[in-house]
Amino acid sequence: MIANTMQHSQSRRVRSAWACFGATLFALSIPPSAQVPERVKLELKSEDTLEVQAAWEPFQDSVYKLYKRYEQLQGFAPAVKTAKHDMQAFRAFLPPDDVAVGDTWRVDPAAALPFLRQLHSGATAELHHGFGAAPGGWACLRALSPEQAEIRLRVHAEFVLVPGDGRMETTSWLTPAQFAGTLVIDRKLGSVRSFQLALPDRNTNVDVNVPMKLKPGETALGGLADIGYIPRMEVFGGATPSGDYATDITVPEAQDRLAKRFYRFASIEWMDLPAAARAARERKRPLHVVLLFGSLDDESC
Amino acid sequence: MVEALNKDFVNAWVLAKDLPRLADASPDENFGKLCATLKQHYTYPVDSIVVSPGGEVLEQRSVEEAMTMQPKDYVAFLEKALAAFRATPSAR
């Protein structure tokens, strides 16, 4: 019981720590997107539909191994393996105005829910962590040619695995780090060539909260928290598009622009620790290290 | 603050649980010592630690302090670490 309470308490401390980094330690303004000359209106006028498949693999690891003890964290499988979506479902990801390559725009994260509910019916755009969480969705036009356009997406959403009354004592949540997506549009046909929303493959990429299992006579004092690794969780459809574009930015550059929309501290030049240790010696600079229980730059904490 | 971090420091974030794995994967003995030092000073759940290029801990802040910290306090933390660094032989 003491250990359980500590886990819950620690989870709150982790979340509060994230809030600190976002709200106080790294306060700064967000730079405007780079300006490029060609601006286009992206449209999906076709009445086609796109078949989207869902895939979801079980936990492979977690800090406290809660997935081995809680049924709601086992046997993950898509709720709807295959579904057809019309173009209206994808229009919600398009920019409201003309855009140029590199531009970003806000996306209603609810636009992702029809797809994420193929994974689990409890998909929601409201993050239960509240203060310290970074809800929402953003998109970036990564590449453009007269024939097609590639949009990169980042959506923060989670799954209510067991609906309770919204309290830690009764409700189970699974909070993925993020859903990173790609939407490729056929500009001539006004249809979607391919679509994907996926949990990035990272060794810590989901957060879970479950109620404590109580023995007779015990009173719940919160829930349990854990962070872990799920190797695959995605929805995808369409054909592999051509990679030929007249204008583009790199995938890491697009991902970086999206990250900066969610987290102000993403403007800091972070390196992995081995590279940073080498750079500190070469540049004769002090090494500023943030040590964490869960990842800094996503929602899996 | 971000400008100062990018100009005067090298920045890294790392999961505390990954420190042993990173140390084991590196043939660099100094890097192994750095990982051991960081793990030794980690207090959970989030710590900011500034070390010299040689691995000497210059300043440390735990989340308990950060939760009540204003941006100016973190700037002061970084300035204190930078001053400590400039007093070390490795800064010259």
Image (cartoon, helix red, strand yellow):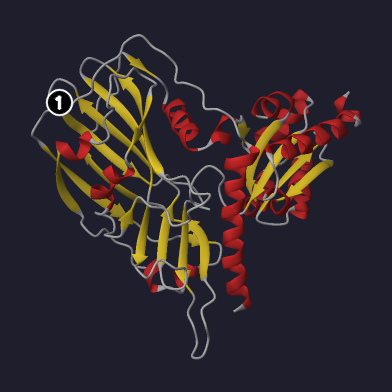
Q: Amino acid at mark 1?
A: Gly
Q: Quadrant of residue A179?
A: top left
Q: Which residue is mark 1?
A: A190
Q: Where residue A289 appears, x then y in whole percent?
A: 70, 41
Closest to the observer, A212 or A51: A212
Give the residue at the far left of this rendering. Answer: A47
Give the residue at the far bottom of this rendering. Answer: A216
Q: Where residue B43 appears, x then y in whole percent?
A: 73, 56
Seen in the picture, residue A81 relative to A7 is either above or below; the reply is above
Seen in the picture, residue A36 relative to B76 is either above or below; the reply is above
Is A49 situated left or right of A230 in this image?
left
CA neighbours of label 1 inside 10 A, class few (<14), some (14 to 19), many (20+): some
Seen in the picture, residue A285 relative to A99 is either above or below; the reply is below
Is A250 situated left or right of A41 in this image?
right
Q: Where residue A45 appears, x then y in whole percent?
A: 12, 28
Q: Quadrant of residue B91?
A: top right
**Which of the chains bears the disc numbered 1?**
A
- Residue at image position (21%, 55%) is A81
Q: Where residue A128 appears, x then y in whole percent?
A: 43, 57
Closest to the observer, A270 or B83: B83
User: What quarter of the picture does the N terminus of chain B occupy?
Assistant: top right
